[in-house]
Amino acid sequence: MLHSQTIGATRWTFDGLKVLMAKASPLRSGDVLAGVAAGSAEENVAAKLALAEIPLRVFLDEPLVPYAEDEVTRLIFDTHNAPAFAAVADLTVGEFRDHLLAETTDGAVLAALAPGVTPEMAAAVSKLMRNQDLIAVARKCRVVTRFRSTIGLPGTMAVRLQPNHPTDDRQGITASILDGLMYGSGDATIGVNPASDSLPAIGDLVRLLDDLIQRFEIPTQSCVLTHVTGAIELIERGAPVDLVFQSVAGTEAANRSFGVDLAMLKEGREAALSLKRGTLGDNVMYFETGQGSALSAGAHHGMDQQTVEARAYAVARAFDPLLVNTVVGFIGPEYLYDGKQIIRAGLEDHFCGKLMGLPLGCDVCYTNHAEADQDDMDTLLTLLAVAGVSFIMGVPGSDDVMLNYQSTSFHDALYVRQVLGLKRAPEFEAWLERMGLTAPGGLLLPARSGHPLLTAAP
């Protein structure tokens, strides 16, 4: 279907919803690389104006990737909740934006709406929004998940403690974990990206994390970020797996490049559920995503990278995850060129995920060859915290020495919690106080010699 818009003497025509969505996106290097970006600011404005007039129902009639060719498309359409959608079914994209921003549209309204929002609808309305709009709506969305700690309660922000090591050295990983715990990080998960793909080595890391958590009765969950098939095999061997991890994307072909499909994700979730290791809930999955992954795999089907990213959230939503993390600046400047583009992408991802009912966190990060620096990350971190982000990363010194990128540190988490009055997960907050690491209210106490945690080195 052709969509058109006239500005002055120029009539702009867009051949189909996919093209219109791409041309309406804020400028980013990945869309330029893919050849789908607007050719001028005027064309971008024309596309936004045309997109604002599109009825939301059109997204249910015009799939961006053919239903017969893509299992993610089939998932989106087959699981769409028509009763939830009914509340906004007669709105255009522009009217949907106004509805989301209305004071009467509160958290309860948004929670009821979430199952009826397709990723394409979320992506479309985000393209009409300023940064403050993305923040204002996301802040109203509350998504609460549980395993051994409760993630997403109002007034809280959790931290994934990320103690990566370039050789998977047990002492190095343990030292980073203890450092993070003493700074009050780790309530989202203690999650290690293994340097090795050896299953015995990964199993050793799983047991190391479990030993620390069990020995000190830490109300958190562990995750070694290996492929879902590795996690399944470890579970079959009796390893104490808490969360099953997988990177996911927004098309079947992109997921295939990760060596995964929906059936495999279902198998991983069922394997983790069979262990019954959660004490508060059974959200056992941890997913990571990122704008540009489908394009880098040649599997974007001509979609703009933000729209295909939102489709990854439909994949995640199908498996009731504890955590979903957009690793926003990790792929590099080919996809998000500078700090401005990274900031915008992080706010878009968080908004779309929360609108769709997901526990969205963000790895506020960049690679060293991007036109970005830690000041940009401070800005995005603060904006996301205002927007109610579920969790962020805690990396020693903010410099991941295994993955070789820049993220956020334990100190950054302290900063944003102090400035905005944000608490940790309540179970974790209580544990820190019992362990003498924080005072009532969450203020860190000076580390004392002889503290039990300091005896934890392997």
Image: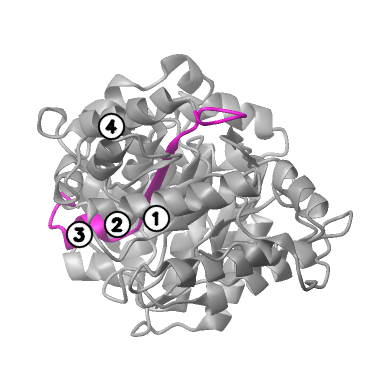
Question: Tag 1: residue type?
Answer: Leu
Which is the main secondary structure of the residues drawn in magenta? loop
The image quarter containing residue 130 is bottom right
N-term mark: 1 or 3: 1
Q: For the image shown, how many numbered marks are present on the structure?
A: 4
- Crowdedness near tag 1: few (<14), some (14–19) or many (≥20) residues, C-alpha within 10 Å: many
Question: Tag 4: residue type?
Answer: Glu
N-term mark: 4 or 1: 1
Label 3, secondary structure: give it: helix
Label 2, secondary structure: give it: helix
Using the image as rendered, state which of residue 105 and residue 427 is in the foreground.
Answer: 427
Label 1, secondary structure: give it: helix
Question: Tag 2: residue type?
Answer: Ala
| Residue 349, image x, y percentages | 45, 53
Q: CA distance from mark 1 to mark 3?
A: 32 Å
Q: Is residue 52 visible?
A: no
Label 4, secondary structure: give it: helix
Residue drawn at (67%, 34%) of the image: 107
The residue wearing badge 3 is 295
> Up-down: is 184 above or below 227?
below
